[in-house]
Image (cartoon, helix red, strand yellow):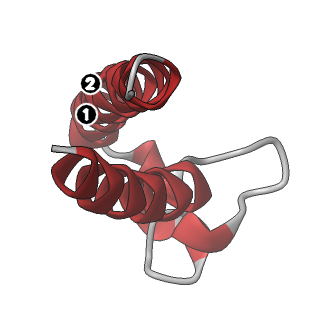
Amino acid sequence: MTTLFTVLLVITSSLLIVLVLLHKGRGGGLSDMFGGGVSSSLGGSSVAERNLDRFTVGIGVIWFACVIALGLLLAYQN
């Protein structure tokens, strides 16, 4: 069971790194390298940013649950 949560934690950690780097920061960030800055004046970019926010929060919740589950499993594993 701990192996499953460990693999899930590694996957969600990697996804969180990528998703956070894709967010548009104050200076543009990595999302400008992939054309995010070009389409920022279009109306659809706000919807894409909102969906990216939702996906990032969802992956963050899964990551947090994996951390708690691994902590509990390792603490009570006798």
Q: Position of residue 7 (x, y in %)?
A: 27, 62
Q: Nearer the viewer, residue 41 or 75?
A: 75
Q: Residue at x 84, y 54 (%)?
A: 27
| Furthest residue toward front | 78
Using the image, tell me which numbered label, if any, was put on residue 17: none
- 9 relative to 63, above or below: below
Q: Nearer the viewer, residue 52 or 60?
A: 60
Q: Nearer the viewer, residue 66 or 74?
A: 74
Q: Is residue 52 left or right of residue 36?
A: left
- 55 relative to 6, above or below: above
Count of marks placed on residues: 2
Residue wearing tag 2? 58
Q: Is residue 62 left or right of residue 31?
A: left
Rate crowding at label 1 as few (under 14), some (14 to 19) or many (20 or more) other CA atoms within 10 Å: some
Q: Are marks 2 and 1 in contact (CB under 8 Å)?
A: yes
| Furthest residue toward bottom | 33
The CA distance from mark 2 to mark 1 is 5 Å
Q: Position of residue 65 (x, y in %)?
A: 34, 19
Q: Position of residue 66 (x, y in %)?
A: 34, 31
Placement of the N terminus among the 4 image quadrants: top left
- 2 relative to 49, above or below: below
Residue wearing tag 1? 55
Q: Is residue 49 left or right of residue 21?
A: left
Q: Amino acid at mark 1?
A: Phe
Q: Residue at x 47, y 68 (%)?
A: 38
